[in-house]
Image (cartoon, rainbow, N blue to C red):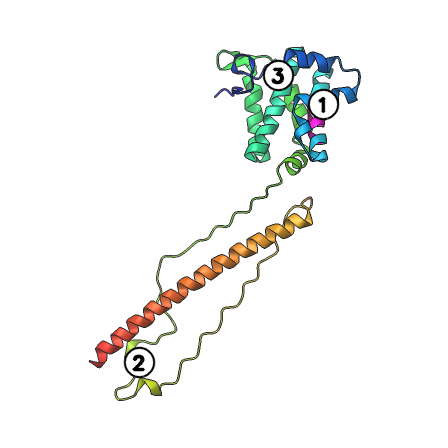
């Protein structure tokens, strides 16, 4: 399936000039130094809206390195603009969809292949096979080698999944004796000694949650607190369900004992 640049203004639905117009590329190519290039990039990619200095710096260096790579390879303006758009589109997809490395890499390969094979209207041959290999190796050596850095800087959401399995098989309650061993004839129920209350279930301690060493301590504490509250709520719900089941069994026993006495 071809990956089109819907909403990006690309040529023919592809990523050529999708993120950089011809005038913007000319301005970047004519910048006198790196500082001027970064200032133009900040304007063109909308980095001035980013409040976090680290995030802004990482984003600008990502795109600056893409331009430097294209210049070293002697790419034309069309190839440079397409590479810029592919790198940006791939990074945006990782941030928006919270993609893991493997899925992000598959998405990048799809983008690159769509612009490396001349098969209209499904793909366009902007890059040669040799250039596609060079681009793939460059992205592996830069973006995916430091993937954790980009993910930490742009996706501060950590997901922990908890699966609760419930058995629907009802077992007899162990705290009640069989009806045959019930109250003997002529003995009042008031004379019976109250049964000992079952021992309280031991409190299950939550094991410490292990996160990566690059995760801040405040975030670790917040994750552990959230998980502890969720587990406590699930435990309380299970205890409430257990108490309701005991009450139903007690009611059944009382009804059966009444029938036996009659």
Q: Which residue is mark 2?
A: 181
Residue 197's mark?
Answer: none
Residue designated by label 3: 82
> SS for tag 1?
helix
Residues under labels 2 and 1: Cα distance?
Answer: 84 Å
Mark 3 closeness class: few <14, some 14–19, many ≥20 residues within 10 Å: many
**Residue nearest the observer in this picture, 70 or 14:** 14
Q: Earlier in the sequence, mark 2 or mark 1?
A: 1
Report whether residue 46 is seen: yes
Q: Which residue is mark 1?
A: 64
Q: Earlier in the sequence, mark 3 or mark 2?
A: 3
Q: Image check: 109 left or right of 41?
A: left
Q: Quadrant of residue 80?
A: top right
Which quadrant of the figure has residue 128?
top right
Seen in the picture, residue 13 relative to 107 is either above or below; the reply is above
Q: Are marks 2 and 1 in contact (CB under 8 Å)?
A: no
Give x and y (percent) for residue 81. Answer: 64, 15
**Residue 145, percent from left and from top:** 68, 32
What distance separates the C-alpha of mark 3 from that of mark 1? 14 Å
């Amino acid at each position: 399936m071809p990956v089109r640049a819907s909403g990006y203004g690309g040529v023919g639905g592809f990523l050529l000039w999708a993120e950089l117009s011809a005038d913007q590329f000319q301005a970047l190519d004519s910048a006198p130094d790196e500082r001027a290039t970064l200032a133009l990039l900040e304007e063109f990619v909308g980095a001035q809206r980013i409040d976090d200095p680290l995030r802004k710096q990482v984003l600008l260096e990502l795109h600056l390195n893409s331009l430097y790579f294209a210049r070293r390879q002697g790419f034309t303006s069309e190839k440079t603009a397409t590479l810029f758009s592919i790198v940006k589109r791939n990074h945006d997809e990782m941030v928006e969809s919270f993609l893991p490395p493997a899925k992000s890499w598959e998405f990048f390969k799809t983008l690159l292949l769509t612009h490396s094979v001349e098969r209209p209207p499904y793909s366009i041959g902007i890059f040669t096979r040799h250039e596609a290999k060079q681009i793939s190796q460059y992205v592996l050596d830069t973006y995916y080698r430091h993937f954790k850095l980009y993910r930490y800087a742009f996706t501060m959401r950590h997901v922990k999944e908890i699966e609760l399995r419930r058995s629907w098989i009802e077992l007899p309650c162990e705290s009640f004796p069989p009806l045959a061993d019930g109250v003997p004839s002529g003995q009042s129920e008031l004379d019976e000694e109250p049964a000992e209350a079952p021992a309280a279930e031991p409190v299950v301690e939550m094991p410490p949650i292990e996160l990566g060493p690059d995760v801040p301590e405040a975030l670790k504490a917040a994750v552990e607190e959230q998980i502890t509250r969720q587990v406590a709520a699930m435990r309380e719900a299970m205890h409430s369900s257990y108490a309701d089941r005991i009450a139903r069994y007690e009611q059944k026993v009382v009804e059966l004992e009444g029938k036996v006495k009659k």
